[in-house]
Amino acid sequence: MDKVALASLRRDYSSRQLSRSSVAKDPFTQFGGWMAEALNSQVIDATAMLLATADANGRPSSRVVLLKSFDENGFVFYTNYDSKKSADIAENPQVSLHFFWPDLERQLIIKGTAERISRGESEEYFNSRPGDSKLGAWASKQSSVVASREQLETQFADAEKQFRGQEIPCPPFWGGFRVTPVSFEFWQGRASRLHDRICYERSGDDWSIVRLSP
């Protein structure tokens, strides 16, 4: 596709609206409502979120991870603790989460601080995973250079042999992170690019709510 064709692409948004008076007082309640609507609407990969991190020198990285749980304490995802994302978080725990639900003409940005969850929480979730997913966690040295696909498959086969006939334990290098939010921005597409943007900012034990210009 050439440059002119890209520049001419347009889509108007008009299916929904969002106002300061209509949102919940608590951002977690508002998020829960939006997530439920995305799931009920059968949005593909509704729990997928873009996790943005930066290292100690401010060099950014982003990748899509899956939200596995949330409550008033924050949003939880799981990964290898030796991964690039984990290294970034160790150096700079300030992160951003971005949900995009195009079928609903919605986006959501959550900014906050990431920290490891307890070992017990990680093990509880790991034990609920399918066997192949458990083996994959042991087989992959995430973010490290691997010589070939064949080597990766060999490592998986080795893990399969190692744990054959027994419960597969949670690797010591694998677990969850919880992102504790300091802000939420709910974005609803509207006509004429006059989109609705409602932002929650942490204010002590409460949340302030403002509308942002599109």
Image (cartoon, rainbow, N blue to C red):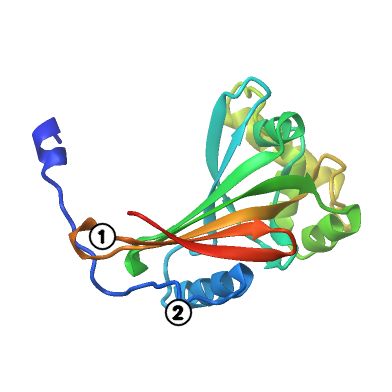
In this rendering, position of residue 117 left or right of residue 26: right
Cα distance between the residues tagged 1 and 2: 17 Å
Q: Which residue is mark 1?
A: 194
Look at the picture and state if 31 lies above or below 56.
below
102 or 151, nearer to the observer: 102
Q: Which residue is mark 2?
A: 22
**x then y, percent, for residue 22:** 45, 79
In this rendering, position of residue 192 left or right of residue 57: left
145 or 176, nearer to the observer: 176
Amino acid on which disc 2 is placed: Ser
**x then y, percent, for residue 37:** 46, 77
For the point 49% across and 75% down, the residue is 23
Amino acid on which disc 1 is placed: Leu
For the point 59% across and 68% down, the residue is 27
Q: Secondary structure at mark 1?
A: loop
Q: Secondary structure at mark 2?
A: loop
Count of numbered badges drawn on the protein: 2
For the point 75% across and 64% down, the residue is 205
Residue 198 falls in image quadrant: bottom left
The crowd level at tag 2 (other Cα within 10 Å; few <14, some 14-19, many 20+) is few
In this rendering, position of residue 157 left or right of residue 48: right
| Quadrant of the image containing the C terminus | bottom left
**x then y, percent, for residue 203:** 67, 58
The crowd level at tag 1 (other Cα within 10 Å; few <14, some 14-19, many 20+) is few
